[in-house]
Image (tube, helix red, strand yellow):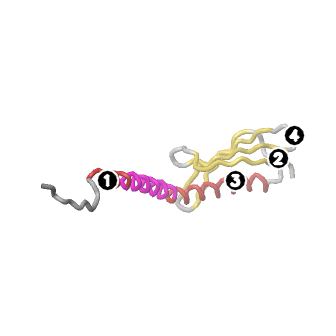
Amino acid sequence: MRIARDCHGFTLIEVLVALAIIAVALGGGLRALGQLTQSAERLPQVVAAQACLDNALAGVRLTGRRPATGEQRSVCVQGRHTFAVVLHVMPTPNPGLMRIEGRALDADGHATAQIVSLAGDS
C-alpha cells in the first residue's frame, strides 16, 4: 500500500540556508550603519579642525612676509572644540616659496586634520 504525499513547502535545510543568508546580509548592514554613525559624529570635529588650519594659513599669508623656517604652534578654539595647531615651515627648491605643513591636534594629541600649502613673498 502506497501513501500519496503532496509535498508542498520548504525543507528544513532550505529554511536554514535562507536564514543564514539573511543573517549575513543583516550583519553587513549593521556594520555599515555603525560606520556611518561614527563618521557623522566625527564630521563636526573635522570641519572645526579644518577651519583652524585655514585660519592659521590665512594668518601666515596676511603678514605679507615670507614665513620663518621652523615650527609654529598656536591654540585654536572653534565652537566647543579646542585644537593645537602646528605649522611646519620648510624651504622648497624654489627660493621664493616655503612649504607649510599644518596639523590640527585634538586634546589627546591625535591629528584631526592635515593640510599642505605653499607661501611666498607677496
Judged from the image, the secondary structure of the residue bearing numbered disc 3 is: helix
Closer to the chain start, of discs 2 and 4, is 2
Mark whose residue sits in front, 1 or 2 = 1
Q: Residues within 10 Å of mark 3 (few under 14, many from 20)?
A: many
Relative depth, front residue between 72 and 104: 104
Between marks 3 and 4, how big is the CA–CA gap?
22 Å
Q: Which residues are magenta?
A: 22-39
Residue at 79%, 56% in the rendered image: 62
Mark found first going from the N terminus, 3 or 2: 3
Q: Label 4's element? A: loop
> Label 4 vs label 1: CA separation?
73 Å
Q: Nearer the viewer, mark 3 or mark 4?
A: 4
Label 1 vs 3, first from the N-terminus: 1
| Amino acid carrying mark 4 in the image | Pro
**C-alpha distance separating marks 1 and 2:** 73 Å
Graded by Cα atoms within 10 Å as few (under 14), some (14 to 19) or many (20 or more), the crowding at tag 2 reads: some
The image's mark for residue 71 is: none
Amino acid type, label 2 = Arg
- Residues at circles 1 and 2 in contact by the CB criterion of under 8 Å: no
Which residue is at 80% across, 38% downward? Answer: 91
Q: Which mark is residue 66?
A: 2
Q: Which residue is mark 3?
A: 56
Residue 14's tag is 1
Indicate the quadrant containing the N terminus: top left, top right, bottom left or bottom right. Answer: bottom left
Residue toward you, 110 or 86: 110
Q: Residue at x 36, y 53 (%)?
A: 23
Residue 6 relative to residue 18: left or right: left
